[in-house]
Image (tube, rainbow, N blue to C red):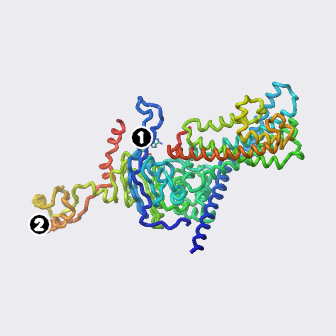
Amino acid sequence: MSSPPSQDNIPAIQAINVKRVYQARGGRSIGGTKAGKTVTALDGVSLSVARGEIFGLLGRNGAGKTTLIKIFTTLLAPSGGQALIDGMDVTREVVKVRQRIAMVSGGEQSGYGILTVREQLWMFAQFYGVPSKVAHARIDELLAAVGMSEQANQKVYALSTGMRQRMNLCRALVSDPEVLFLDEPTVGLDVEASRAVRDYVRLWMSQDLRRTVLLTTHYMFEADELCNHVAVINHGQLVAEGTTADLKRGLQEHARFQLEMAEWAPAFTDMLRGRDGVVEALTEQHADRTQLRLALLREEFIMPTVASLNDAGARILTLRRIEPTLEEAFVRLVGDEAEAEAEGGH
Amino acid sequence: MATPISALSAGRTRISQSRAWQTLRAATWLEWETRGNWTNPALYLLYLIIRPMTASLVLVLMFWVIKGVGAHDGIYGFLITGSAAWTFVEQIIAGIPQAVLADREEYAMLKYVYITPSHFLLFLTGRALPRMLVAFFSFVVTLGIGIALLGVPVNLLQVNYPLFFASLIVGLVGVTALGILLAGLALVLKRGAYQMPQAVTGALYLISGAIFPITVLPSWLRDVSLALPLTYWLELMRRALLGSHIGESFPVAETGAVFGLLTLTTVVLIGVALVAFRICDFQARERGQIDRTTGY
Ligand SMILES: Nc1ncnc2c1ncn2[C@@H]1O[C@H](COP(=O)(O)OP(=O)(O)O)[C@@H](O)[C@H]1O
Ligand SMILES: [Mg+2]
């Protein structure tokens, strides 16, 4: 309401070479190695999120996701570099930044148990200077949207984990923020609650194009479902960035296709292997059809290849481009769980 | 062109003023709701009475043991007024850091409050206000029981009410400043954050003349005592309630001068508290302690 209209060419969220070093936890030495040591949680992260995007930050536990969110939300000072919200520095223009942002973290039992859901949401609206009348109207709307109108007057301590997290989402949205940070918002929630959270985030984004979300998660399907752009963070460094499709495709050296064929002859396989641009052709015989898998040098080779099969007399039932899942792309980038553990053991 | 600009800035000021007021009100309300055990008000009221009473009765008993039953009234007056007034100190100085720690560790909400654009100091001040009310209740009850059972010489018709309320208000401002300072410390302490406020309150109890005149302190401790607004505040509360003859042993005779010193030390304390809080707040953000939940 009171904030001047934001300029569209300035990124909603921007990190410029952000670093963060912690003093190692505990201070007590374990085997004489830990005393006075530091942990580099962020090692020069740069990223930029345009207004209107749902941006996913993917990474394993300990990769540095929460640390980056804490820096953007003014909870934690960066050790180096610059973090900006709407072009405003999070350490220098704290109040202006805070007027624009909100945050929800997953995997915690937060809330003033003795208050009712409505009271808690009203209180947060007060901290943002939202008039009570406006606040109550918003609260009704938000609670209805996440499917917890009936719980409005229930005490927070009596809420299930899923309901509590829906309330937390409402708490973040009651101030009508422009930039929303979601730190693993569906961790530990059941399927229904997770879906309610994701669905509402998507709806909320669609209601106003100036809104921006930065979401961290280690659920790849969640990122795939919600995000336009993603970045993968590993050991405090970004290792990949782009659209989810970019990320999946970036993995593939070759364009892969799967075809269901009828009227197949073994000679076709040799014919294909001899063609320009065909790297690999494999078949698998089924009762009524043949499954053909092709690896091509580039995507464009598929049309002439299909034409040549047609000319030879084979009949194509289906044709499908095979893309790796985001999960596969992710594992390729950061290694699998077992490797991560082996590394951690050092 | 001038009109829209001034209208805009006027609007902005109004909104942030309203946010300040709304924050204070919401924080007060939050403390009222979370601290008061309103599901069982009778029990809560009893607790509010018994706590200061036991404290002063222990002192009276100790006095009996040393001096024998029926000793001098002036001492009871001194003890009861001191420990009645001390409930303000306990409720607020220990209460504000407690509120911060509970928000951080028990409710895991401090980080969400912290990242709102509200003024954090107003949030903390709001948390102190219901405690003032609660302490006032304890104060009145303790004093009433002292008058009725121990013959504490407070004549309600002769109390210097202007002095009483003026001192009370300035005293509460100072106590709140001290509470805010300790809340800042509680944020950054790695260990003992929960015990620290109690320890500080205990030390102040001994040196600010709550239960014995500061003239019995070694001279260097007396100097510390005379740098604290609490010392002047307790002295003024006593003079307002019991009459100025009580001040005979106090190093400053003139009541107006005592009030001046109360005001002066309070202003200094506010300055110190604000600077200290800023430093602690900055440190807490540097070290990532705003959302720590393992500080038990
Ligand atoms: N307060 C802290 N003190 C010391 N080390 C920390 C602290 N917070 C996080 N770390 C370390 O920093 C790294 C990144 O943590 P975090 O940002 O929480 O990762 P993620 O959210 O991706 O799981 C981890 O190695 C973690 O152990
Ligand atoms: Mg995390």
User: Where does label 1 land, which residue?
Assistant: A39
Task: Report the Cα–Cα distance between label 1 and label 2.
Answer: 63 Å
Q: Nearer the viewer, residue B11 or B123?
A: B11
Amino acid at the residue labelled 2 = Ala
Res B213 → quadrant: top right
Left or right: where A38 falls relative to A268: right
User: Where does label 2 land, which residue?
Assistant: A312
Labelled disc at residue B80 = none
Comparing marks 1 and 2, which lies closer to the viewer? 1
Rendering coords of residue B209 (x, y %): 76, 35
Amino acid at the residue labelled 1 = Val
Helix, strand or loop under label 1:
strand
Rendering coords of residue A56 (x, y %): 40, 56
Q: Compared with residue B198, is residue A178 higher up or lower down, i.e. above or below?
A: below
Residue A1 in sight: yes
Helix, strand or loop under label 2:
helix
Q: What chain does mark 1 sit on?
A: A
Q: Residue at x 46, y 48 (%)?
A: A78
Q: Residue at x 56, y 66 (%)?
A: A2
Residue A117 in sight: no
Rendering coords of residue B161 (x, y %): 84, 48
Q: Nearer the viewer, residue A291 or A31?
A: A31
Mark 2 surroundings: few (<14), some (14-19) or many (≥20) residues within 10 A: some
Left or right: where B278 falls relative to A107: right
Mark 1 surroundings: few (<14), some (14-19) or many (≥20) residues within 10 A: few
State which tag comes first along the sequence, 1 or 2.
1
Left or right: where B123 falls relative to B147: left
